[in-house]
Image (cartoon, coloured by chain):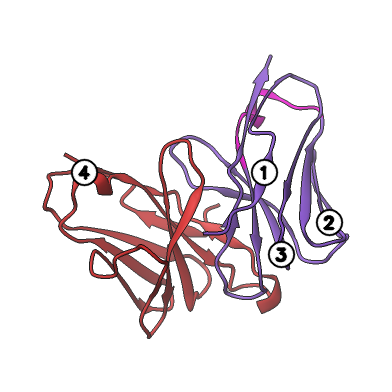
């Protein structure tokens, strides 16, 4: 099935550094979401974006819905050890009760 | 706190056993829920859409007779893996759109997943 192009695949950073990851698609998406998944658990919603150009923050996290509706990025500022995990972007082609299309994930490792 | 509850979190059973997984929305109703499957170090892949009061819709390649879905109430969907075999071992996760918000802006919340291991 369809999948989003998420990069980078993995990152190793020092504690305190900023992080940036992004997702792109050849199709237009009407909703973009970012999730974090810890081992053995389900994804936890970080940020949801509903309008092209929208920029939303959640603490040290900031995400943007690309103006073309074909991309989104997630930034994490001043990383801390508990930021370790896998981050997934997800999109909905249409609004409403429709399934999500996921990126392949970005595995983040933070070195203290 | 959690808004979607999934149970059990882990199942280990013999080949040929049928396993039922429950997904409940807490604090809101969900006419639609989704079931995903995740293999190690991979992303989530949609298996089926569970619809309250009607038949589930399955993604291409997912056997409906193998993965039975029942959405009998507005807060509960169940996935039954029938006659499970080792190749069915995986991490199964459900999600539900947040019914407390406006229809156009309902992010999906996920359960904690069920790790199924078939011996």
- Please report whichever mark, 2 or 3, sits nearer to the chain's N-terminal start: 3
Q: Is residue B77 left or right of residue B116?
A: right
What's the CA distance linking mark 1 and mark 4?
Answer: 30 Å
What's the CA distance linking mark 3 and mark 4?
Answer: 36 Å
What's the CA distance linking mark 4 and mark 2?
Answer: 42 Å
Q: What crowding class fits label 3: few (fewer than 14 Cα within 10 Å), some (14-19), or many (20 or more)?
A: many
Residue under label 4, please give it: B86
Instruction: Identify the mark at residue A6; answer none if there is no mark.
Output: 1
Q: Is residue B80 left or right of residue A9?
A: left
Determine if residue B115 is in view. no
Q: What crowding class fits label 4: few (fewer than 14 Cα within 10 Å), some (14-19), or many (20 or more)?
A: some
Secondary structure of the residue carrying numbered label 3:
strand
Residue under label 3, please give it: A31
Residue interval drawn in magenta: A78-87
What's the CA distance linking mark 1 and mark 2?
Answer: 14 Å
- Please report whichever mark, 3 or 1, sits nearer to the chain's N-terminal start: 1
């Amino acid at each position: 099935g369809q999948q989003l192009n998420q990069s980078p695949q993995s990152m190793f950073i020092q504690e305190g550094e900023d992080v940036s990851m992004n997702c792109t698609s050849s199709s237009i998406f009407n909703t973009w979401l970012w999730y974090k998944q810890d081992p053995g658990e389900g994804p936890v919603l970080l940020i949801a974006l509903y309008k092209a150009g929208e920029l939303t923050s959640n603490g040290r996290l900031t995400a943007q819905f690309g103006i073309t509706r074909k991309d989104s990025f997630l930034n994490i500022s001043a990383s801390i050890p508990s930021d370790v995990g896998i981050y997934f972007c997800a999109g909905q082609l249409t609004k409403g009760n429709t399934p999500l299309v996921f990126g392949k994930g970005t595995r983040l490792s933070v070195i203290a | 706190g959690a808004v979607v509850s999934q149970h059990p979190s882990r199942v280990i059973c013999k080949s040929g056993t049928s396993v039922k997984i429950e997904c409940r929305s807490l604090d809101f109703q969900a006419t639609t829920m989704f079931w995903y499957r995740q293999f190690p170090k991979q992303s989530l892949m949609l298996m089926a859409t569970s619809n309250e009061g009607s038949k589930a819709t399955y993604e291409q390649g997912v056997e409906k007779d193998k993965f039975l879905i029942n959405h009998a109430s507005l807060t509960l969907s169940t996935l039954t893996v029938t006659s499970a075999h080792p190749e069915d071992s995986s991490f199964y996760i459900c999600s539900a759109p947040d019914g407390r918000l406006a229809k156009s802006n309902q992010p999906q919340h996920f359960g904690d997943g069920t790790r199924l291991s078939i011996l």
